[in-house]
Image: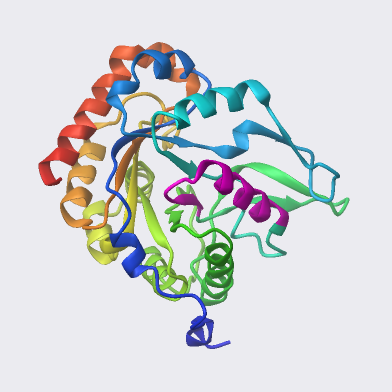
Amino acid sequence: MAVNNLLEPSIPSQASALSSIPKLGVGLLYNPALPEFLRTDLDCLDYISIIPDMFWVDRGAGQTDRYAPLKSWLELLDQVAAKRPIISHDIGLSIGSAAHMDDAYLDHMASVYEQYHFLWHSDHLSFVQVSGPNGFDHNAGLAIPIPYDTDVLEMIARRVRKIRSTIPVPFLLENNVYYTEFSEQDMTEPQFLNGLTKLSGCGLLMDVHNLYTNARNHNFDAFAFLDQVDLERVVEVHIAGGNEIAGMYTDSHAGPCPEPVWDLLEYVVSKAVNLCGITFEFHASYYPLLKVKGIRAQLERARSVWASVH
């Protein structure tokens, strides 16, 4: 199939939609260590990003009443949503799965949107669902990278257009972290990202810690990478920390951001004219390292970078 055949006139370009999103500022990705922080320190946040999959139990495809809500979690979400805008960062779409797309998951996310009206939503440019020998899908437990090939680009672009036609707010895809590389790919990662935004109308969630991790492990220039990406499509930026394990630097969300991540953030913020939010994320297990003081310090530094342009 020719790539241009993916462009259907029934769904308008998202370029104008990206520029019209409210520019929120600085936010935090919710995790189970944060309820008390959100009760006492909500003043340092402009918005909350949630992983909606954490707020229900998924009984599996084809099950009656597949999604069972977790009442106590939703009560907290309702309290926060009454005070701050909510952004949705999904982990269950598995948009890169070759076999099929989970339409029931997309329909469920549409119902979540109807309740919380998030200003934009995102997922990862990867896949998590894999088929086992018994014929059932299994969650791999991590975001598996995709090859940057033409057929994969066409498949994901079609799926993005379906997502955009189902949920009427901008949809973003996040650049993925990878620890091994596919050989003989059709294009580079920046070429793939630019092609995807052009063909599908999606925006980008630029995770600069993912970029830093890849650049460090695979020895390339992260700033040169950014120069090749259409940064006008970047709506949100993720920042995080990591650590080194057995000679490999990992995207473990381990506490504060390293200095090179701040440098990359400043570079993106200076060039991403449609940027609407900077989101700090950390794993709940690192709360004893950060504590309230450490979280606030990361958010305040992110706000100073945001304020340098906005």
Q: Residue 220: x, y in percent?
A: 29, 54
**Which of the 4 image quadrants contains residue 295?**
top left
Considering every residue shown, the one lying at the far right of the view is 134
Q: Relative to residue 103, is residue 192 depicted above or below?
A: below
Q: Relative to residue 20, is residue 136 depicted above or below?
A: above
Q: Residue at x 44, y 69 (%)?
A: 196
**Majority secondary structure of the magenta segment?**
helix
**Which of the 4 image quadrants contains residue 221?**
bottom left
Q: Residue 44: x, y in percent?
A: 28, 24
Q: What is the number of callouts on the image?
A: 0
Q: Which residues are magenta?
A: 104-124
Q: Is residue 159 magenta?
A: no
Give the side of residue 304 with respect to residue 41, left or right. Answer: left
Q: Is residue 123 magenta?
A: yes
Q: Residue at x 51, y 62 (%)?
A: 182
Q: Residue at x 48, y 51 (%)?
A: 122
Location of the C terminus by quadrant is top left
Q: Residue 147: x, y in percent?
A: 53, 64
Type of colouring: rainbow
Considering every residue shown, the one lying at the far left of the view is 308
Q: Nearer the viewer, residue 298 or 303?
A: 303
Give the side of residue 123 with respect to residue 297, left or right. Answer: right
Location of the N terminus by quadrant is bottom right
Q: Nearer the viewer, residue 174 or 104?
A: 104
Q: Residue 48: x, y in percent?
A: 41, 33
